[in-house]
Image (tube, rainbow, N blue to C red):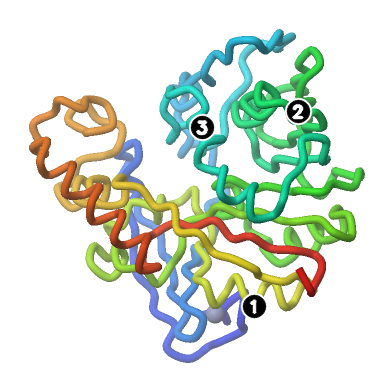
Amino acid sequence: MDACKICGNTVNNKPFQVREMMFGIRDEFEYVECGNCKCIYINKIPENLSGYYPSDYYSFQPQETSGATAEKKKAEPLSLNILLYNKKKYKHILKLHLCFKKIGLQKNDKVLDVGCGTGNLLLEMKEKGYTHLTGCDPFIHNNVIYDNGPAIYKKSIFEMEEKFDLIMMHHSFEHMDNSLEVMKKATALLNEKGHLLIRVPVANNYIFKKYGTNWIQLDAPRHFFIPSVKSMQILCDQSGLKLNNIIYDSEAFQIWGSKQYQMNIPLIDSRSYKSNPNQQLFFRWQIWGFKLMTWWLNATKKGDAACFIISKQQDF
Ligand SMILES: [Zn+2]
């Protein structure tokens, strides 16, 4: 077995099989948990990933954002993160209030959202008065340029050239294979006082220990790499960045989703809580219990997702 791509460890790396369960394809993939830094990575990326993004995957359209006069080009596909969002207005930006406050983000700061799909979060930020908004996502069909608003380019982070005050990755980092190169490129794109904000699933958490291969955030084979806190620290050290803060922001999804996989019920399924909140799988009081448990997991730094606040300046 290859060495861990983050820390180079070769001892006690544990392989395990994970099924594709978002769409219920149920193909199996080998993942590895590093015996040292505890990150989880797919052992071999499938050659043809498009089969794991079925056509109805693209039918999830971005929310309509009022006030944004959009010259949208048609049929933009979406990043996975959009799939997991609901339609509540300002849902995305509300979650980020504390993060933006911690880094002191100004309305005229230059912001880049990497892997932004068609830019729902950026549109919300525009409505809230942010003025310099850019996005990039190599999987959209075309550039998407909104009137007076975000410009979203069909590019990977490696094709971006401007400098930014804030670079964000909202559940896109785990879809990229070359995490260290991504971090180093982000470092090169940041202004001297710039910040990097990475929201990502976190390995070595309570839910993975409890549900194992049914942990919903493994999301085989679309998630190539799930860092632990230790692996994020290693990546920051190797990129010359400073890891300042970790805000756990996991949701009750971690529990009901993993329980569904345990019951062999895909995320996209008529029986799923995602498709039908009035489903028969969980009582309402159970869902409230999952939310309470999630609050506790986040408060005790054991949730399955977090926002890593990283700065370029070492003395931030
Ligand atoms: Zn490792």
Q: Can you tell me which quadrant of the image ligand 1 is in?
A: bottom right
Task: Give the image quarter of residue 123.
Answer: top right
Q: Which residue is mark 1?
A: 234
What is the number of callouts on the image? Answer: 3
The residue beneath circle 2 is 152
Q: CA distance from mark 3 to mark 1?
A: 29 Å
Does the beta carbon at disc 3 come under 8 Å from ligand 1?
A: no
The image position of residue 47, as x and y in percent, is 57, 50
Q: Is residue 197 left or right of residue 90?
A: right
- Asked which secondary structure carries label 1, the reply is helix
Distance Cα–Cα, label 1 vs label 2: 31 Å
Does the Cβ of the disc 1 residue fall within 8 Å of ligand 1?
A: yes
Amino acid type at circle 3 is: Ile
Choose top left, top right, bottom left or bottom right for residue 208: bottom left
Rendered residue at 31%/62% (across/down): 297
The residue to which callout 3 is attached is 82
Q: In the structure shown, which secondary structural element does the residue marked by tag 2 occupy?
A: strand
On the image, the x and y values in percent for residue 205 come to 36, 68
Q: Horizontal and vertical percent for residue 118?
A: 64, 25
Query: Reading the chain from its start, which is encountered first: label 2 or label 3?
Result: 3
Q: Residue at x 53, y 61 (%)?
A: 225
State the residue at coordinates (78%, 37%).
155
Q: In percent of the image, x 81 and y 56: which residue is there?
A: 194
Query: Mark 2, residues whose alpha carbon is within 10 Å: few (<14), some, or many (≥20)?
Result: many
Q: Is 160 rendered above or below residue 59?
A: below
Check disc 3: other Cα within 10 Å, few if <14, some if 14-19, many if 20+: many
Left or right side of 142 for 174: left
Of the numbered discs in the image, which one, if any, rests on residue 168? none
Residue 275 location, quadrant:
top left
